[in-house]
Every structure is written in structure tokens, then in C-alpha cells.
Amino acid sequence: MTDRLHPALLRLGVNIDHVATIRNARGGIHPDPVRAAQLATAAGADGITAHLREDRRHMTDADIARLVGEIDLPLNLEIAATGEMLEIALRNRPHAACIVPERRAERTTEGGLDVHGEHGSLRPFVARLADAGIRVSLFIAPDDRQIEAAAALAVPVVELHTGPYAHSDGSADELARLARAARLAASLGLEVHAGHGLSFANVSPVAALAEIAELNIGHFLIGEAVFTGLETAIAQMRRLMQAARP
């Protein structure tokens, strides 16, 4: 039996938000993010991630409903901890909901959720999702206090924010920070995911961290697909991830 703290198979979740970003730049229905999800499935993705932002800058409510109804892979719905997003998640019943921080002015998610500071407000939110059978994860910085707060909420999953690592050109210090956080989270019984800013150039050291069970990658893959096609980009990312496993 595979040790759940040291998963042998590293899963790849493909975030398709920016297919919708391109569509929305002009309006209409092309390119279709659901078609992108279907191509990702064919290319060997293990799951699909989509972030429904409050301002609907990329994915729309209709996109989420279609993804739930039309794809075979588990859907990981990224949402802010608001009443509106809770109702949408409960109505659509995705496989998983990843709670993320959200600010209107940001171009992309800039930091991790402050689970420690928002523990009281997050507890009923997490409970409602869990009671509906939705697997809850929290997108957090690789910080001991945030990981311990997540464990205290009894969520099954944390996703470590790899943005600082990616933006530092893969610095050894940021990698060590991720490694320590992954070990702590796994020791507390949490399944460990990671994502943000990962690319062909920097994914291997993160993929080599044995405690990490899943990487969620989107922007780079959609950008690379412009040049090589989505299936080719995903296949290459999977090769790099699996080659890096210990």
C-alpha cells in the first residue's frame, strides 16, 4: 500500500482559467474552457481546476455548471470565502473546493489565505462545504502557523503557494521553505498540494518533494499551448513531474 504521506504518483491538476480569459477579451464563446478541460483529460491530467472570481474576469457561473456536467475528471473549484461563492459551490457540488484569498485589484492570487487570522469565519464555511460532501482545501503560504491553523480546522488538504519560489527563480531558500512546510503538513495528516507560477523550468524541484501529492498548474500551460498545443504542453509537464519523483 502506498504511504499517504509519501505518494508515489504525483497528480497534475490543470487550471483552465486563462482559456476563459482569452475568450472574454473579445466576448463570444471561443475559445471554450470546457473543450480545454476535455483536451486536458485526453492528455492525461488528473483533475481540472477553475477559479470563479467575484468579478467573473475569466470563468463564469455557466462555465462551472458545464464543467460539472460535461467532464469526467474531478473539478477543483477555487472560491473566496463569501456567502455567494458558498451557495454556488453547494449548488454545483464540485469534487473539491479550494478556498483562496481574493482582492479585486490583483491580477492573480498574490498570497495565501490567512487561516490563522480568519479561523473563526472560516470554520462554518468549511463545515458547510464538508457537510455537502465537497472536499475542502485551503490555499496557504508555506508557513507553520497557517499549516497548524488549517489542521485545526480539520480540512483534508492544503495547497502550498509556490509563487515566491517561482518568482525567485527557484531559490534554494524558498525551496527549503516549501520542503519544510510539506513535511509539517503531512505529519499533521494533511494531503499536500502545491501550485502557482510553476513552469517547465522550475517544476522539477517541487515535484521531487515526496510529501506533495498534487500540483495545480494553469497559466504556464495555457501560454505554452499557444506554441505547442495544450496536449503537448501537458504531456511534457507530466514527464518532468514524474521524472523528478524520488
Image (spheres, grey):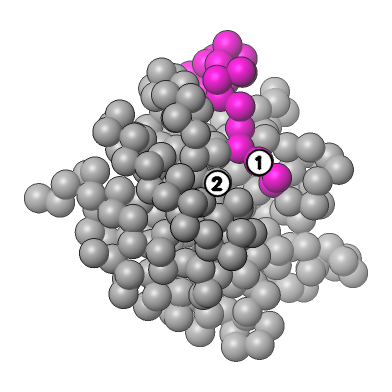
Answer with left or right where residue 203 lies relative to residue 49: left
Q: Earlier in the sequence, mark 2 or mark 1?
A: 1
The residue labelled by disc 2 is 161
- Contact, mark 2 vs mark 1 (Cβ under 8 Å): yes
| Depth order, front residue of 196/168 | 168
Judged left or right of residue 64, residue 193 is left
Under mark 2, the amino acid is His
Q: Residues within 10 Å of mark 1 (few under 14, many from 20)?
A: some
- Which quadrant holds the C terminus? bottom left
Which quarter of the figure has residue 197?
Answer: bottom right
Query: What residue range appears in magenta?
Result: 109-131
Placement of 240 over or under 143, stated as above or below: below
* 69 in the magenta segment: no
Badge number at residue 111: 1
Tell me where residue 47 appears, x and y as whole percent.
45, 58
How far across and down, in percent of the image, does residue 75 sit?
Answer: 50, 51
Query: What residue is drawn where x is 35% and y is 51%?
Result: 212
Residue 158: percent from the left, percent from the top?
45, 38
The outermost residue toward the left is 1
Where is 205 relative to 151, above or below? below
Quick one: label 2, few (<14), some, or many (20+) residues within 10 Å? many
